[in-house]
Amino acid sequence: MKLSLVALAMALATSSAFVPSSPSSPRRVVIRPDSSSLAVSSSSSSNAKNTSKATSKKLEEEFESVDPAAVASPSASAAKKAKEGQAEVVLVGCGAPNRGMGWYHAVQMLEGRCPSASLDYVIEPWFLGPGAEGPGGPEFNDWASSLSSDASSSYVSTPAFLTSVAELPSPSQPRVALISGRTADNPRLLKECIDAGCKCIYLEKPGAPTVKELEEMRDVAAEKGVEVLMGYNKNVCKYVRKTREFAATVPGSHVTFVSNNAYENTPESLGECFERNAEGMLKNMAIHELALLVSFYDVTVENIESVTADKEFSSMQTLPGPSGKEFTDFDKIKFTIKTKTGKEVSVAADRCGGTDSYATVTDANGEEVFRYWMPDEEDKKTVQELQAKYPTAMPYFFTQDPDYVTVKERVAKNTVTGEEAEGVATIAIAVETLRVAEYLTPVLMEQLK
């Protein structure tokens, strides 16, 4: 049945969101009609108030029966979805524009920078539900609305916005889920995505709150024949590759990986950071470096001979978050690991150290002989362009921009063709990385007391 203009006007008068009863349809449709087209005269309003219960019920049934896709936008019938040779991407956990990692993943795919990936669905239960009017909610919904406007005509896909994985229809092309929500939700979301027909899962770090949960996720995926690949983008970074290559030419070399974020060095800023990333720095910011150690330096819990904190560099604080609850974490940490097989490597991470990451190589005498930055001179132009385009976005998005693209493209191609996602960490690497993080955190905290 066609949706009448009056029915649409009445519905929009009480709600900006359309929530259909059918679980297979999108649960929210953003509509930005011209206000004049929905004008209802005073006499019409009066008549509407006097509508009989039978008429009201009929009107409600008429509204509920409409396909949301038909009213999502004037061009909904021409929605751009995955084509042959592309993976149908489901982004689970988008987050707020300019702040959420999921949002930046979405932007890269919408701009066509990952040719094998088509962003067809965005699952965002918070901002399409209880968080719609809270911090970040209006910005998210404005952004979602803009994707169906003429301004987004250059985007290569037209995603549908849903509130749960259960609402997904059957896949039309090989489906991959990019899970970028709260770490605590990942075990449930992975199972839901597998049930929704995902052939592959791209899981953002650290994957799960605990080793036990991540191991269970690994086992569930293996039982269902679903590959799980991780968003450890630094495994494919240029600066990591070049540093490792140079270190191999220097006898007795020692590598230090340095990671920086650009939070303000204030209790308010760091407190917000500690609460939002409550899993802790080693399971969050520095988890990428730990993945490098597991991938390339034989670091496992069983193979660690010693770990030593650099007390002069390192700092640990207990701060209240926005909720008022206190969190204890490192705001910066540096440590060196020696393995039982004779390897030695260092990591430094600073929440307030700036936007750039880098790696150094020292020789047998401790003299620095090599340093490579991310971004390098070649990539700085891209960073400047992205900063101009998205001036309020998190700065680290831009310095790691090409690596995010590389990982997504390799995962999407793997989903479609089965081709190995070269350099992309597997869930097995993620399990060991999380084990190392859980082992190191109390050891380093104890050394800094």
Image: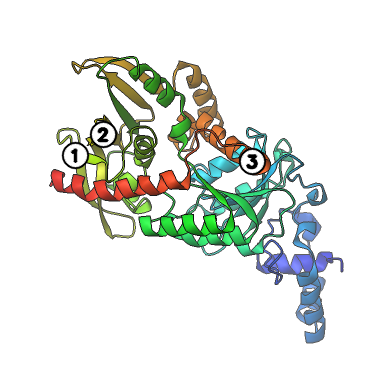
Question: Which amino acid does the dot numbered 1 rest on?
Answer: Ser
- Tags 3 and 1 touching, CB below 8 Å: no
**Left or right: residue 394 compared with residue 12:** left
Does any portion of residue 365 appear in the rendered image? yes
Query: Measured along the vertical axis of the image, is residue 361 above or below residue 91?
Result: above
**Left or right: residue 100 compared with residue 71:** left
Mark 3 burial class by Cα count in 10 Å: few <14, some 14-19, many 20+: few
Quarter of the N terminus within the rendering: bottom right
- Tags 3 and 2 touching, CB below 8 Å: no
Does any portion of residue 126 appear in the rendered image? no
The residue that label 3 is drawn on is 418
Task: Give the secondary structure at mark 3.
Answer: loop
**Left or right: residue 4 compared with residue 373:** right
Residue found 29% across the figure and 27% down from its top:
256
Instruction: Looking at the image, tell me whether mark 3 or mark 2 is earlier in sequence order.
Output: 2
Mark 1 burial class by Cα count in 10 Å: few <14, some 14-19, many 20+: few
The residue that label 2 is drawn on is 341
Q: Nearer the viewer, mark 3 or mark 2?
A: 2
The answer to which image quadrant residue 25 occupies is bottom right
Task: Give the secondary structure at mark 1.
Answer: strand
Task: Give the secondary structure at mark 2.
Answer: loop
Give 445 or 326, whichever is nearer the viewer. Answer: 445
The residue that label 1 is drawn on is 306
Q: Position of residue 30 (x, y in %)?
A: 68, 56
Q: How many marks?
A: 3
Question: Which amino acid does the dot numbered 3 rest on?
Answer: Gly
The answer for how far apart the CA atoms under marks 3 and 1 are is 40 Å
**Left or right: residue 258 compared with residue 2:** left
Q: Position of residue 17 (x, y in %)?
A: 66, 63
Q: Nearer the viewer, mark 1 or mark 2?
A: 2
Q: Position of residue 375 (x, y in %)?
A: 44, 23
